[in-house]
Image: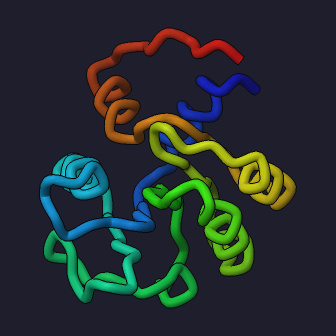
Amino acid sequence: MTKEDVVSSILGYARRIAVVGLSPRPSRASHDVAAALQRRGYEIVPVNPNCTEVLGVRAYPSLADVPGDIDVVDVFRREEYLEDVAHQVVDRGGVRALWLQLGLHSSEARHLAVDAGLDYIEDRCLKIDVAAASAGMKLPPEPE
């Protein structure tokens, strides 16, 4: 399956998205992306131990604290934390995909997610892909 196929699959089932590292500051990319997804009807679940609420939604200190299943975990953390986030995703269960935002790569996170049967995307913006899909646009395939 190509990266584009994986993105299309994720967009087909994504409804509840946990945003790890969601900032309460509107100037931050995580806030902008989550707000755009929320406006498009996605259920956003903020995960940030330093907040109790972001975008009018209760925030949770960790993925383990989030009740219920999560379709996608969208990550806005520095690369040194990505392997740990991937472990948390796999350990909690009930997650279908791990998505690392633009500029983020982790071979460790990729191996953990794929070995656990999750869909995995790195170095892409969920907001951009959702907008493109909603507009019926196809993004050019990325070099592998």
Q: Position of residue 89 (x, y in %)?
A: 65, 70
Q: Is residue 74 above or below residue 46?
A: above
The reply, left or right, for residue 22 in relation to residue 83 is left
Q: Is residue 89 above or below residue 28?
A: below
Residue displayed at 60% across by 65% down: 81
Q: Position of residue 82 (x, y in %)?
A: 62, 60
In-front residue for pair 74/51: 51
Quarter of the image for residue 52 reads: bottom left
Q: Position of residue 14 (x, y in %)?
A: 47, 51
For the N terminus, the image quarter is: top right
The reply, left or right, for residue 124 in relation to residue 87 is left
Quarter of the image for residue 88 reads: bottom right
Residue displayed at 62% across by 68% down: 85
In-front residue for pair 117/111: 111
Q: Position of residue 126 (x, y in %)?
A: 41, 41
For the C terminus, the image quarter is: top right
Pick out the residue farthest to the top: 140
The reply, left or right, for residue 144 in relation to residue 101 is right
Residue displayed at 40% across by 67% down: 21
Q: Is residue 50 above or below residue 111?
A: below
